[in-house]
Each structure stands twice: as C-alpha cells, then as structure tokens.
Image (cartoon, grey):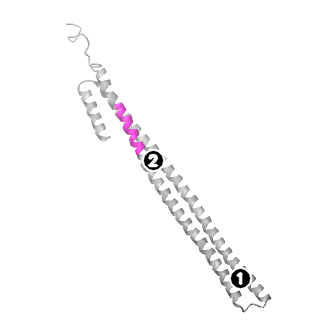
Amino acid sequence: MADSSFGSLAGIGVSAATGNFLGAAVGAVGLGLSLFGGMGASHDAEQAAQIQGQIAGLEGNVNEQRRSAMQLDSRRKSLEQIRLAQRTAAQATAAATNQGAQFGSGLQGGLGQIEGQGAFNLAGINQNLEIGQNIFDINSQISGQKMALSKVQSSMATNQGISSLGGGIMQAAPFVSKASQGFGTGGGTNPGGPYV
C-alpha cells in the first residue's frame, strides 16, 4: 500500500507540474478516499474482531459452566456409589446374621465382592470425569484459536478493502489525467491568442 501511495503522490505531482490540474485533483481525491476508506474499514474490522472475541469469551464461559456441572454430577455419582456399596454391605451382613453365618467365609467373600464392585464403579466415574475434563480443555483451546483467527481475518479484510479501493481509484487516475490534458491550461484552438 505504501508503494502505491508514493506512486500516486508522484503521479499527482507530475500532473500538477504539467498543468493538468484536473488529473492532479482526481488523483488527490482518489488518494484521500483511499486513506479515509481504509481508516473506516480498519475501525470496522477492529470492532468486528472485538465482537468475535467477546462471543468466543462467552462460549468459554458456557464451557466452564458445563465443566462445573460435569464435576458436580461426578461427585454426586461417586457419593451414590459409596452409599450403594454401604447399603449392600449392610444388607448382606444383616442377612448373614439372620442365618447365623456372620462369622463364615461366605459373608466375607460377599462383602469383598460388594467393595470391589463399588471400587470398579467409582473408577468408571473418575475415568469419565477425566475424559470430560480433557474435552473441556480442548474446547477452551478451540475458543482461543477462534479468537486469534477472528483477529487475523479482520486484519485481512481491512487490508483487502484498502487495497481494492485505493487500487481502483489509482487505476482510474491515468485515464482521467489523459482525458483532461489541456483542460484549464488556457490553450485553445488558437495558440497565438485572439489578436494574431
């Protein structure tokens, strides 16, 4: 963009130096519009990037709320499994006592199975919690990448808009310059003046 601005300024200077003031004026207007449009597009793109960043931040907040809900659910399920194992062990002990087998190896084997099943269930809950934590961490990274991408896209759009507007106007300047040569220089069909 800087090279085309310097080229445009040089073209404006050449047009003015050769007396082609209309061509110089068109070039100056084109350059001014290019700069003004570029500043406006840059401001709009910056606002768009901020909005996209805020959206990604809100998505991250939702992600954290889901994570909290998952952790709470995991704790509840863990407590439920512990209570279930305690109830089942108490029922097995009561049944064995009613039958007079509270000192037998059958009761101890049954209690071992109950404890083993409870530990297995808790391990499953903890594994699911760990998988869920990993998924939420990955989602947080994705949100961060979305924010970074929105900034890059915003910058790209700004630069493309500036380039397109400036390029279009600068491409038109030579044609206007050629069409307006001699305009406003006082030269007419009688180069010697009216009294020759």
In reply to whether residue 166 is colored magenta, the answer given is: yes
Q: Is mark 1 on a helix, strand or loop?
A: helix
The percent position of residue 102, horizontal first and vertical second, equals 74, 90
- State whether residue 108 is above or below residue 175: below
Residue in the foreground of this view, choosing between 134 and 111 = 111
Q: Which residue is drawn at 66% across and 81% down?
A: 113
Task: Identify which residue is drawn at 80% across, 88% down.
Answer: 98
Residue under numbered circle 1: 89
**Distance of label 2 from label 1 (alpha carbons):** 64 Å
Task: Find the magenta span and give its range.
Answer: 156-169
Residue 25 placement, left or right of 129: left
Q: Where is residue 86 in the image (x, y as percent from the top left)?
A: 70, 81
Q: Residue furthest right?
A: 98
Residue extending furthest top?
196
- Dominant SS of magenta comes to helix
Callout 1: few (<14), some (14-19), or many (20+) C-alpha neighbours within 10 Å?
many
Q: What element carries label 2?
A: helix
Q: Which amino acid does label 2 sit on?
A: Glu
Local crowd size for mark 2, using a 10 Å CA cut-off: few (<14), some (14–19), many (≥20): some
Please tell me how many numbered marks the rendered image carries: 2
Question: Which residue appears at 60% of the width and 72% of the height?
Answer: 124
Residue 57, percent from left and from top: 52, 56
Which residue position holds label 2? 46
Horizontal arrangement in the rendering, residue 103 relative to residue 70 (left or right): right
